[in-house]
Image (cartoon, rainbow, N blue to C red):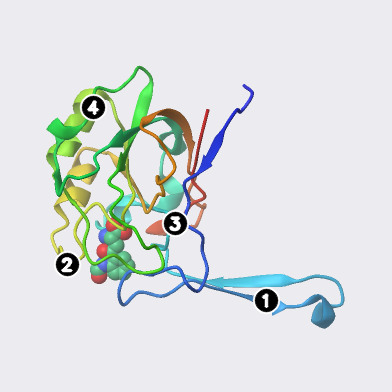
């Protein structure tokens, strides 16, 4: 297949990338320079696993849940549909469109994270009926353009739990500003970090 267009739907990772309040910020620095080592620059990264565009493993919210290196990779390499849900403060299963054949990921474009240099004060509420809609429509992955599928201060994490009990997966912090609603190929593979709860990803949509 010849790739015609690529949308990079990833947040840039730097010291300016806003972390979850109270969490560990992203940091990259050179641990050794060419001058020091005599041959190469070598970087060092310190970060939360929930930074920028990232995947949650069920272990993030369930001690018995699978870890990031155990996630089924086909969920993150698939046909995805971008749904325009702009203007809604609450999104339920009945707000979602009919999906086209072969689609197994739904990416919700809320357009509510306007300034990505700051952690947003609020974002729309995702209703657990979305998990049932996903089951009915054969959708394995839910992607959102905000930091979480639950609210910032939620302790019981109803959306995360609904996704877990239906064996559905979560991709957060995608950037859909330039992406019209429609059907694309998605690649958003998590890093193979042993025992991890989450991982940043480089996420792209392409046709
Ligand atoms: N559940 C959120 C992340 C989250 O809740 C969180 C991430 C980093 C540090 C603390 C967090 N939550 C509560 O303490 C997510 O969907 O990624």
Tell me the CA gap for discs 4 and 2: 29 Å
Q: Which mark is residue 30?
A: 1
Dot 1: few (<14), some (14–19), or many (≥20) neighbours within 10 Å? few
Percent coordinates x, y for residue 177 in the rendering: 40, 46
Tell me the CA gap for discs 4 and 3: 29 Å
| Residue at x 51%, y 52% (from the top left corner) | 191
Tell me the CA gap for discs 1 and 3: 21 Å
Q: Which mark is residue 204?
A: none
Q: Is residue 174 above or below residue 182?
A: below
Q: Which SS class for mark 4?
A: loop
29 left or right, relative to 93: right
Identify the mark nearer the N-term, 1 or 2: 1
Q: Which residue is denoted by mark 4 in the rendering? A: 97
Tell me the CA gap for discs 4 and 1: 46 Å
Q: Which residue is denoted by mark 2 in the rendering? A: 153
Q: Which mark is residue 199?
A: 3
């Amino acid at each position: 297949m010849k790739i015609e267009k690529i949308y990079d739907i990833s947040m840039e990772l730097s010291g300016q990338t806003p972390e979850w309040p109270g969490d560990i910020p992203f940091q990259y620095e050179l641990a050794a320079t060419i001058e020091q080592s005599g041959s190469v620059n070598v970087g060092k990264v310190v970060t939360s696993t929930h930074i920028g565009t990232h995947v949650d493993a069920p272990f993030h919210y369930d001690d018995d849940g699978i870890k990031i290196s155990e996630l089924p990779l086909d969920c993150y390499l698939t046909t995805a549909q971008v749904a325009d849900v702009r203007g809604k403060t609450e999104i339920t299963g009945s707000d979602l469109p009919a999906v086209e054949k072969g689609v197994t990921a739904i990416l919700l474009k809320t357009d509510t994270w306007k300034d990505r240099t700051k952690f947003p004060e609020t974002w729309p509420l995702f209703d657990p009926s979305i998990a049932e809609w996903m089951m009915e429509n054969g959708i394995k992955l839910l992607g959102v353009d905000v930091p979480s599928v639950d609210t910032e201060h939620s302790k019981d994490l109803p959306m995360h739990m609904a996704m877990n009990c239906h064996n559905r997966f979560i991709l957060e912090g995608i950037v859909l500003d330039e992406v019209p609603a429609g059907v694309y190929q998605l690649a958003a593979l998590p890093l193979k970090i042993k025992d991890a709860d989450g991982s940043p990803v480089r996420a792209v949509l392409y046709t």
